[in-house]
Amino acid sequence: MSTTTLTITLNDGSIVPWLAFGTGTALYGKDAANFVRAAIDAGITHLDGAQAYNNEDSLGTGIKASGKPRSKLFIVTKLKALQPGQTLKKALEDSLEKLALDYVDLFLIHDPTPARKEGTLQNQWKEMEAVKEAGLAKSIGVSNYTVDDLKEILKSAEVVPAVNQIELHPYVWNAAEPIVNLCKEHGIVVASYGGLTPVARVPGGPVDEHLARIRERLEKTSGQTVTAGQVLSKWLIQKGAIVVTTSSKVSRIKEFISTEAIPDLTAEEVHAIEESGGKLHKRIFMKHVFSE
């Protein structure tokens, strides 16, 4: 069995496998247990869940069924908008109960807009710092935060977010690059979702011809089959990003894992992907955050 060996080190010293199996999108609101167990059996150790996906209990079931020691897994969940009277700490405790865990490795604020509207981004981040201090989350971070959102919480943050998980692929690169640059400046790792959008959701776009050419070059260089999806994942890896993906097919999961063995893209290939991606803007998720 192949397993992910490439890792990324967060600003708090935590070590994260580069590839995560997500329980959103195709698994949203569904029993994810069998898919999670299959992903772990295939070699995945990084599991990305969320309160909003409405399946944390089955994520926990899949983790338990795998028999994998807790210490060998990196488990993420994300905060959804709080219910009236609910504290952030209680929301995380409820998640831990569903997951049947004592802690998560990474806890993210899923969406900045509720706190942004209330002017409480800084206060909410203080509550995140408190759950880290209490040991309920080893690392804390955010998701879908814009440059302005990040700057707002950094004004008073004692703990710099470890991660900002955003939609990241060539068709949002122009909009995302300032966020990526600010994250880099502050040692915040970018985690990407929706990374296969150019092949899975927007086929026929301007990036396609470059993916085909790069794929052909990599196949000749490596002597192995390379897919367009692997080229996109390689681009994300070379951006220093964690890659979150979902598939119900074990063969596809193994394909993702094997991406780390593919030769690097050249600087010219990276530039070609980004330049052609800049010719089309296509955001798929969380459009309200970016006023789209």
Image (cartoon, grey):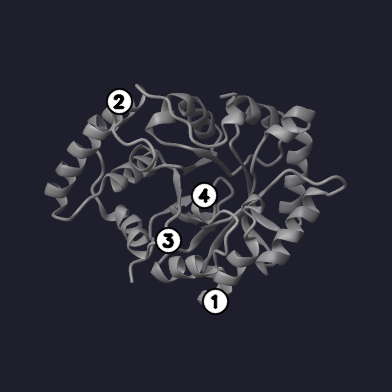
Q: CA distance from mark 3 to mark 2?
A: 30 Å
- SS for tag 4? helix
In this picture, residue 5 sits left or right of residue 165: left
Q: CA distance from mark 1 to mark 4?
A: 22 Å
Task: Give the class, few, some or many, for how many residues have Cα within 10 Å of label 4's Cα (few <14, many ≥20).
Answer: some
Residue at image point 50% right, 70% down: 34
Task: Give the class, few, some or many, for how many residues have Cα within 10 Å of label 3's Cα (few <14, many ≥20).
Answer: some
| Quadrant in which the C terminus is drawn | top right
- SS for tag 2? helix
**Residue 108 percent coordinates (x, y):** 64, 47
* Quarter of the rendering containing residue 233: top left
**Residue 68 percent coordinates (x, y):** 51, 74
Kindly identify which residue carries mark 4: 25
Farthest residue toward the right? 85
Q: Are marks 1 and 4 in contact (CB under 8 Å)?
A: no
Give the number of callouts.
4
Judged by depth in the image, the label closer to the viewer, 3 or 1, is: 3
Type of the residue with mark 1: Ala
- Up-down relation of residue 69 to residue 77 (above or below): below
Type of the residue with mark 4: Thr
In this picture, residue 21 sits left or right of residue 150: left
Q: Which mark is residue 65?
A: 1
Q: Which mark is residue 276?
A: 2
Residue at image point 60% right, 66% down: 58
